[in-house]
Image: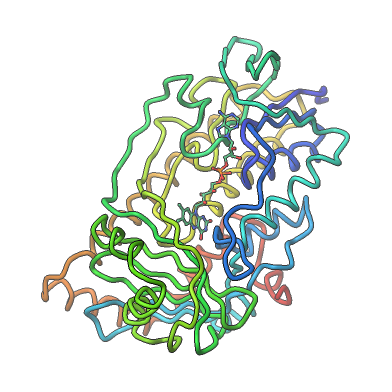
Amino acid sequence: MRGRQHVVIAGGGPVGAVAALTLQQRGFAVTIIDRSKPTPGPQGLGMDIRNVALSPGSRELIESVAVWPQQAGVFKSMHVWEQWGVNALHFDATELGTDCLGWICEAAPLLHALWQQLETNPDVRVVLGDVESVESHASGVTLRVADEAVQADFVVAADGARSAVRNLLAVPTRVWPTGQSALTTVVETERGHQHTAWQRFLVDGPLALLPSKHEHYCSVVWSQSAESLATNLAVSDAEFCRRLCCASEDRLGGVAQVARRLSFPLQQQLARSAQPRPRILLIGDALRVVHPLAGLGVNLGLEDVRALLDCVDETNADLVPECFTKFARQRLLKSQIMLRILAGLKTLYGQPSPLISWLRNVGVGAVDQSDWLKRQIMFEALGARHGRVRKNEIQGRT
Ligand SMILES: Cc1cc2nc3c(=O)[nH]c(=O)nc-3n(C[C@H](O)[C@H](O)[C@H](O)COP(=O)(O)OP(=O)(O)OC[C@H]3O[C@@H](n4cnc5c(N)ncnc54)[C@H](O)[C@@H]3O)c2cc1C
């Protein structure tokens, strides 16, 4: 029989909040630590400028603990094309017999929905403050937050790319600079987005126009070099709209309005272990940070949570560190694979050479012609392989 063990989650971002609520559902005493409650975040055209793409697998997990945010915009297809090519990849939900591929969700309403549950759940304790020290012993872990020493049987660190837990433990972390930053904003376009996620690979970096709930509003994630970023941040709104229109080959017609432009430096990184101490696990961005070109950050973090829950569900007895050995090995391996794929894609599409461009086009054309291959790619992206979501369960969720 399992006793009531105490799990501390460091970090109340989307990944940490879902981890806390799902572990509480399984009977653990849970404390979640964050330096502050989520704030509304930068707004533009009535929307949060920070957006994340969520797969059906991620939605299923979120809905098991919180109310799904109504602001989320559904996407039913994806269209991927490139600067130098004639071939394009088109993925459509109907090819899978489903009616959507995922959602673009504003960060603020998602965090609000999760924190509402955290703060009203009598079995979750919320501690506000910075994690200042971590001591790991054979039988538990002690975290110091402001003046309090928080004791735990296990600590799950979900405190983001600059994880304090990871840094305090001096876990070696490999960083791969991408040489790019992401410019993010919200735009109003002349033509409707048709619930399609539009992604164009430019030699300078990928540009994504992601559909919101409003047919004519898209969030923009435009990865680019430092030189392009400096220009694209400095130009007037009118000039930026013209540049964006040109970069997206007018797919959505003219760009009528643009919100504030923000930028984030982009790097990929990976900690050496997902279990750096026997009773401490790293998940989400604390474990790995991926390039946003595939919109995978939160989805991979929620996959970590599902893998963690699988370990918990496998035993009725008290958890011991050995329960997480498989989790740590598998999540590290999955992270290495995803980092390599994303780095490879970025390099492949950053090559202006005519020969490589021709090879890319042949490859893209072949994939687009292969229904089987496209279905495999879509199942992976939907989180259907790793989650419990199956084709028939994805239907009817728009
Ligand atoms: C431009 C851009 C676009 C992106 N687009 C997408 C997308 O489309 N889809 C997608 O899935 N992902 C996307 N991502 C990635 C996504 O934002 C991250 O993967 C995601 O936020 C990671 O979630 P997390 O909960 O692991 O960490 P975070 O969201 O970073 O949360 C960490 C939490 O820990 C807290 N914290 C940090 N340090 C401490 C401390 N010392 N003490 C206490 N608390 C602390 C923070 O306050 C925060 O609440 C994008 C990222 C960028 C930069």
Q: Nearer the viewer, residue 263 or 286?
A: 263
Q: In which quarter of the image is residue 175?
A: top left
Residue 134 drawn above or below residue 375? above
Residue 389 drawn above or below residue 78? above
Q: Nearer the viewer, residue 279 or 147?
A: 147
Q: Which of 383 and 194 is in front in this view?
A: 194
Q: Is 369 placed left or right of 377 in the picture?
A: left
Q: Quadrant of residue 211?
A: bottom right
Q: Is 160 placed left or right of 206 in the picture?
A: right
Residue 2 drawn above or below residue 89? above
Residue positioned 48% across, 37% down in the render = 287
Q: Position of residue 352 (x, y in %)?
A: 15, 70
Of all residues, the one furthest to the front in this rendering is: 236
Q: Position of residue 40 (x, y in %)?
A: 66, 52
The N terminus: image quadrant: top right
Q: In which quarter of the image is residue 253?
A: bottom left
Residue positioned 57% across, 82% down in the render = 216
Q: Where is residue 153 in the image (x, y as percent from the top left)?
A: 69, 19
The quadrant of the picture showing ligand 1 is: top right
- What number of labels is visible? 0
Residue positioned 60% across, 52% down in the render = 41
Residue 152 drawn above or below residue 364? above
Q: Position of residue 260 (x, y in %)?
A: 49, 63
